[in-house]
């Protein structure tokens, strides 16, 4: 994989997080609430909740916010039912895109997602149409500065990680099973590591570069629409030069 390109994407995502903190907190809050309703309020007995808490903490959601959302979800008598649906498709010039959603109205969400693909020269595909181009894995990102590689490798594997990717100039990426993110992130945090992000990700096996300015503009605007939609939780793609979009 192209660790450098992936880190560029993470940097852009982090910048967007800083610029739209309230929206990010709301989306993660929805994930926490769904996890509590499905498996209870105790993260030690609810691995999905533990994973989302790890994601929230890495995104700098305050502990007070996390606890408040958990308590509210545990005591809430809401009849709202959110469904997890993953959409797949292609952007301009064959860029593969995976869109993870949490929705209480799948017809509305499917219509929105299809419209975004169509509007900017892409097309929504069937389940499995692009996911074979990605590996679904837990991924914990840690800044390289001040971190001893051998010590991190030892600590990560002891915590239950599968591997540590070291080919990026800026970060280490600790790979885990998709349901092990929370446990490994918790152990690494206790060991003193500063986590940039911690969640299950779709990592591309190959990347596609866009050189045409119109394609770059279309792809960037498509991603913006996905990220602005309240039903969309995460968007994954294999666009190599995302930083060329200046929107």
Image (cartoon, rainbow, N blue to C red):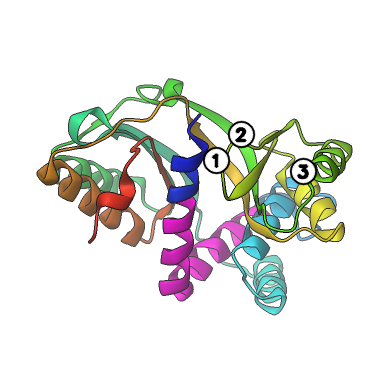
Q: Secondary structure at mark 2?
A: strand
| Residues at circles 2 and 1 in contact by the CB criterion of under 8 Å | yes
Residue 43 visible here: no
**Of the image marks 3 and 2, the number of the one nearer the N terminus:** 2
| Residues at circles 1 and 3 in contact by the CB criterion of under 8 Å | no
The crowd level at tag 2 (other Cα within 10 Å; few <14, some 14-19, many 20+) is some
Residue at numbered disc 1 = 201
**Does the magenta segment cover residue 35?**
yes
- Mark 1 vs mark 3, CA separation in Å: 22 Å
In the image, residue 226 lies at what x, y percent?
A: 31, 52
For the residues carrying marks 3 and 2, which lies nearer the camera in this image?
A: 3
**Of the image marks 2 and 1, the number of the one nearer the N terminus:** 2
Tell me where residue 227 sits by quadrant: bottom left
Horizontal arrangement in the rendering, residue 233 relative to residue 34 (left or right) = left
Q: Secondary structure at mark 1?
A: strand
Horizontal arrangement in the rendering, residue 50 relative to residue 29 (left or right) = right
In the image, residue 135 lies at what x, y percent?
A: 54, 27
The residue drawn where x is 24% and y is 59% is 246
76 shown above or below 129 = below
Q: Which residues are magenta?
A: 9-36
Residue at numbered disc 3 = 149
Q: Which mark is residue 137?
A: 2
The residue positioned farthest toward the left in the image shown: 214
Q: Secondary structure at mark 3?
A: helix
Nearest the eye: 132 or 18: 18
The residue drawn where x is 56% and y is 45% is 169
The residue drawn where x is 15% and y is 41% is 215
Nearest the eye: 93 or 24: 93
């Amino acid at each position: 994989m192209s660790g450098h390109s992936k880190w560029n994407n993470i940097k852009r995502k982090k910048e967007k997080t800083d610029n739209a903190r309230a929206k990010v907190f709301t989306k993660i809050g929805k994930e926490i609430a769904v996890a509590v309703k499905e498996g209870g309020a105790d993260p030690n007995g609810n691995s999905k909740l533990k994973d989302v808490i790890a994601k929230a903490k890495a995104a700098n959601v305050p502990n007070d916010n996390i606890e408040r959302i958990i308590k509210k979800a545990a005591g809430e008598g809401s009849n709202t039912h959110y469904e997890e649906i993953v959409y797949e498709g292609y952007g301009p010039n064959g860029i593969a895109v995976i869109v993870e959603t949490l929705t209480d109205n799948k017809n509305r969400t499917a219509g929105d997602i299809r419209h975004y693909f169509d509007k900017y020269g892409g097309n929504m595909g069937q389940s499995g149409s692009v996911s074979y181009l990605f590996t679904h894995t837990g991924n914990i990102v840690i800044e390289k500065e001040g971190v001893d590689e051998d010590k991190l490798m030892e600590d990560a594997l002891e915590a239950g990680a599968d591997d540590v990717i070291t080919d990026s100039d800026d970060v280490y990426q600790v790979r885990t099973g998709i349901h092990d993110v929370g446990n490994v992130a918790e152990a690494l945090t206790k060991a003193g590591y500063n986590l940039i992000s911690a969640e299950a990700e779709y990592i591309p096996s190959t990347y596609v570069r866009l050189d045409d300015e119109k394609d770059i503009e279309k792809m960037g605007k498509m991603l913006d629409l996905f990220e602005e939609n309240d039903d969309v939780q995460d968007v994954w793609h294999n666009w190599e030069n995302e930083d060329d979009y200046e929107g």
